[in-house]
Image (cartoon, rainbow, N blue to C red):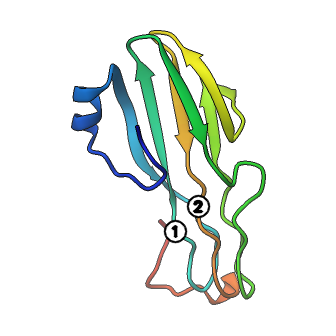
Amino acid sequence: HMTNTLNTPVESLELHYPLQVNRYQIRRGSGGAGQHRGGDGLLRELCFKQPATVSLLTERRTSQPWGWAGGSAGQRGENRLNGVPLAAKTTFEVVPGDVLAIATPGGGGWGPPTEESPKQGIR
């Protein structure tokens, strides 16, 4: 059982569930541009070792998180099973070797991108 904000260590997931974490990283560049950039999302890629039932209850898959006060929108999230897009809210069966990729959305930026602070740099 994982929730939206749970940051379970990879080692714990692999110890307690029949899966392998192929990737768990920051989704660079997914935050919207702005004087204050939106935060980047995450990318998790899981490879299943046994049959399982998976339920996803995710948000911001069809629309982007909006920017504010002239900031740009963040990138929308994405769920894929073996490269095939999935709905934001779905339940499905997996078999050994199936790979589930979950990309969380980036946050929207705040303020006009032309006034982006140089000390923030490119992430």
Point 60% across, 86% down: residue: 35
Q: Position of residue 54 (x, y in %)?
A: 53, 26
Q: Position of residue 39 (x, y in %)?
A: 52, 68
Under tag 1, what secondary structure?
A: loop
Q: Is residue 19 toward the left or the right of residue 72 in the image?
A: left
- In terms of image quadrants, where is residue 46? top left
Q: Which residue is at the front of the view, 9 or 68?
A: 9
Point 56% across, 76% down: residue: 37
**Please, what is the three-letter code of the amino acid marked with disc 1?**
Gly
Point 57% across, 72% down: residue: 38
Look at the numbered discs 2 and 1 and tell me whether their residues touch, using CB distance below 8 Å: yes
Is residue 82 in sight in this rendering? no
Q: Is residue 79 toward the left or the right of residue 72 in the image?
A: left
Residue at image mark 2 = 106
Point 33% across, 19% down: residue: 18
Crowding near the residue tagged with mark 2, few <14, some 14–19, many ≥20 C-alpha atoms within 10 Å: many
Q: Is residue 112 above or below residue 2?
A: below
Q: Which residue is at the front of the view, 39 or 7?
A: 7
Q: Position of residue 91 (x, y in %)?
A: 63, 27
Q: Is residue 45 toward the left or the right of residue 109 in the image?
A: left
Q: Position of residue 13 (x, y in %)?
A: 29, 34
**Please, what is the three-letter code of the amino acid marked with disc 2?**
Gly
Which comes before the other along the chain, label 2 or label 1? Answer: 1
Q: Is residue 47 above or below residue 55?
A: above
Cα gap from disc 2 to disc 1, whole angstroms: 6 Å
Is residue 86 in sight in this rendering? yes
| Label disc, if present, on residue 39 of the rendered structure | 1
Under tag 2, what secondary structure?
A: loop
